[in-house]
Image (spheres, rainbow, N blue to C red):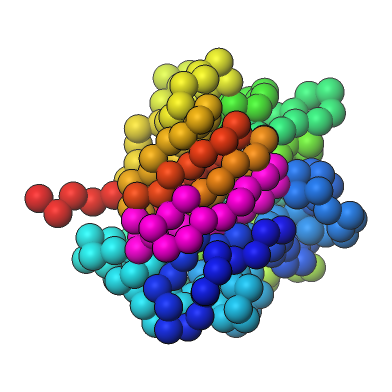
């Protein structure tokens, strides 16, 4: 992993910084594809998530999940200490000193349980957070004979039916009620808060989320220790009000899924339009050089090598590297023969 750009100190303006893996222990298996991408020998069995440039802690934890910078500081604390430099004025006007973004590499070594996430409104009312957890998946790798994800009920489901499935832990009924969607690298899926979903074994994604760790785990048996840990400490019926029980037909699904594998321009927008309210993502193919506008952002290099040139320092990149870009780095120039995913928080105009 390359070192941070020269001269990084607490007093200096933040620079583009390379980040090590950050894989807090999870309840499900995975991590092999993260190790392969990063060129690491780390073979941990329960490290399926690499939280990249994270200022979000795992639910119920004080620091687990937070990114620690090469100088020893938590990124969360560095951003809070110099929010203007890290985030820019317009971002602060909209979100304060919160990055408004959580990015992960997620390697599903087994199928994830059926679960969903609260909306902003539910999170404000019940969890004391301005953010719920809408998310999106960018498929960057698959393995196995039939890589799939599961998204939304196929038809409307009554509240008492959902309650029965959860109470009896009827995994077959829950999974069987969802749309099963085959995926391949280049596919992207937008997952609005409240939508029941799961990721199948062998699916490797870059995941963008609102910056929380809120999950309502409908299918907890065989995954979590007990039902109490499945509902964020909420009363069960209250928690289940987060579930969108409406059926997702072909038209609804088509508005959430995008196929980008055949798009090879310098910048490929990866997510459907409605995702832009929550986060932005592009696949970058510089083929020489490409300029990125000033913004807080996360860069994940999928192929090749190159250089990230910023006003206050350069960073050498190669496959598997991840980096955080502060707003103060200015108009960053990405050079080289590489493929990278660039993730950003939503952009709000000052006009």
Residue drawn at x 89%, y 54% is: 41
Residue at image location 52% in from the left, 20% down from the top: 264
Instruction: Give the farthest residue toward the left.
Output: 351
Q: Is residue 350 left or right of residue 189?
A: left
Residue 119 at least partly seen: no
Nearest the viewer among 337 and 151 is 337
Is 40 or 135 nearer to us in this picture?
Answer: 40
Residue 338 in view of the camera = yes
Taking the spot 60% from the left edge, 31% from the top edge, the residue there is 337
The answer to whether residue 92 is left or right of residue 169 is: left
Whole-percent x and y of residue 58?
A: 61, 70
Residue 227 placement (x, y as % from top left): 70, 66
- When the figure is inspected, residue 290 is found, relative to residue 318, above or below; the finding is above
- Residue 300: % across, % down: 59, 46
- Residue at 46% x, 65% y: name it: 15
Quarter-of-image position of residue 14: bottom left
Q: Magenta span has 97?
A: no
Instruction: Find the magenta span and give its range.
Output: 309-330
Q: Is residue 314 magenta?
A: yes
Q: Quadrant of residue 273?
A: top left
Is residue 179 positioned above or below 93 on the image?
A: above
Kindly give the residue lying farthest to the top in the view shown: 262
Quarter of the N terminus within the rendering: bottom right
- Position above or below: 89 against 39: below
Depth check, front residue: 169 or 114 = 114
Closer to the camera in the image, 127 or 273: 273
Rendering coords of residue 192 (x, y %): 45, 43
């Amino acid at each position: 992993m390359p070192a941070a750009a020269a001269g990084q100190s607490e007093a200096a303006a933040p620079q583009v910084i390379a980040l090590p893996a950050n894989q807090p222990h999870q309840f499900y298996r995975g991590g092999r594809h993260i190790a392969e991408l990063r060129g690491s020998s780390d073979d941990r069995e329960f490290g399926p998530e690499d939280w990249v440039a994270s200022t979000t802690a795992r639910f119920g934890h004080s620091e687990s999940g937070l990114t620690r910078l090469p100088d020893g500081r938590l990124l969360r604390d560095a951003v809070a200490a110099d929010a203007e430099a890290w985030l820019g004025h317009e971002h602060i006007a909209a979100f304060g000193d919160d990055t408004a973004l959580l990015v992960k590499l997620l390697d599903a070594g087994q199928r994830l349980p059926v679960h969903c996430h609260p909306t902003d409104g539910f999170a404000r009312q019940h969890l004391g957070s301005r953010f719920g957890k809408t998310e999106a998946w960018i498929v960057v790798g698959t393995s196995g004979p039939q890589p799939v994800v599961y998204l939304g009920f196929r038809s409307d489901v009554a509240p008492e039916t959902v309650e029965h499935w959860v109470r009896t832990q009827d995994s077959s009924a829950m999974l069987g009620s969802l749309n099963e969607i085959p995926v391949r690298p280049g596919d992207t899926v937008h997952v609005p808060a409240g939508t029941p979903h799961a990721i199948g074994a062998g699916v490797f994604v870059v995941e963008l989320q609102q910056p929380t760790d809120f999950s309502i785990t409908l299918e907890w048996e065989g995954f979590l220790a007990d039902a109490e840990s499945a509902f964020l400490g909420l009363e069960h019926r209250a928690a289940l009000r987060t579930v969108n029980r409406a059926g997702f037909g072909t038209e609804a699904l088509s508005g959430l899924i995008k196929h980008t594998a055949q798009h090879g321009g310098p910048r490929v927008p990866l997510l459907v339009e409605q995702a832009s309210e929550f986060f932005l993502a592009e696949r970058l193919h510089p083929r020489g050089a490409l300029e990125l506008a000033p913004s807080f952002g996360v860069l994940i290099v999928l192929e090749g090598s190159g250089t990230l040139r910023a006003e206050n320092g350069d960073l050498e990149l190669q496959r598997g590297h991840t980096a955080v870009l502060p707003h103060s780095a200015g108009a960053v120039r990405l050079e080289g023969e590489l493929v990278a995913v660039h993730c950003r928080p939503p952009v709000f105009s000052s006009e």
